[in-house]
Amino acid sequence: MERDNIPKHRRIIAYIFVVIGFVSLAFGIITLNTFHLVEEWFRPNLPQSINLGIMTIHNPFQWLVIFPVINLTVAMFKIIAGFGILNSKNWASKLALVMAFFWFFQFPLGTAFSFYILYSFLDNRSTANLKAEDSHSNKG
């Protein structure tokens, strides 16, 4: 299916996913590099372990690296969802709905964008179009 046949709202959502994905990817890379730089600068002053009573965390600063890694992973899913929507893949609309759920809690822009995704993908006409496309692609 060509991009001209994709409904206008879905094409807008796909471009937003791709742009936000690449911005998040850049932010995640910058944050990851900043964490490594700060760790090198302040290594002598950082605590080597934290005793919490029931457990001890060794080298606690290294656990902060998980946040940019999660950000990079989510950014890749945004980019994949955007290109999947542009190529009219059924799994991409499901991925977009899952991401809309998580964006719902990022008030105010994430909430507005989530409502826009839900409006576009849960509309009866677009759902019927997706089912027709799936049955057409399964025959061919």
Image (cartoon, rainbow, N blue to C red):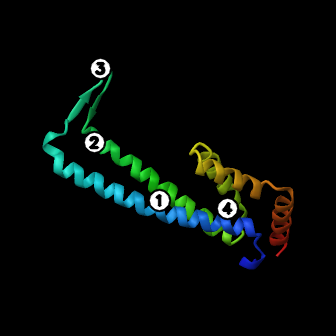
- The residue where tag 4 is placed is 92
Quadrant in which residue 137 is drawn: bottom right
Q: Which mark is residue 24?
A: 1
Identify the disc placed on residue 53: 3
How dense is the environment of label 3, judged by Cα within 10 Å: few (below 14), some, or many (20 and up)?
A: few
Q: CA distance from mark 1 to mark 3?
A: 37 Å
Identified at 15% across, 40% down, the residue is 45
Kindly give the residue lying farthest to the front in the view shown: 108
Say what amino acid the circle numbered 2 marks.
Phe
Q: Please, what is the three-letter code of the amino acid marked with disc 4?
A: Ala
Question: Alpha carbon of mark 1 to alpha carbon of mark 4: how far?
Answer: 19 Å
Task: Classify 46 as above or below 118.
Answer: above
For the residue pair 130 and 137, the one nearer the viewer reads as 130
State which tag comes first along the sequence, 2 or 4.
2
Q: Residue 69, image x and y in percent?
A: 41, 52
Cα separation between marks 3 and 4 = 45 Å
Q: Residue 96 at x, y = what percent? A: 66, 56
Q: Which residue is mark 2?
A: 61
Question: Where does the image place residue 50, in percent across and percent down from the top left?
Answer: 25, 30
Question: Which of disc 1 and disc 2 is earlier in sequence?
Answer: 1
**Along the line of sight, the residue nearer the viewer: 75 or 8:** 8
Name the spot of residue 57 as percent of width and height, x first: 28, 32
Q: Is residue 80 visible?
A: no
Which one is in front, 24 or 64? Answer: 24
Residue occupying image coordinates x 85% and y 66%: 135
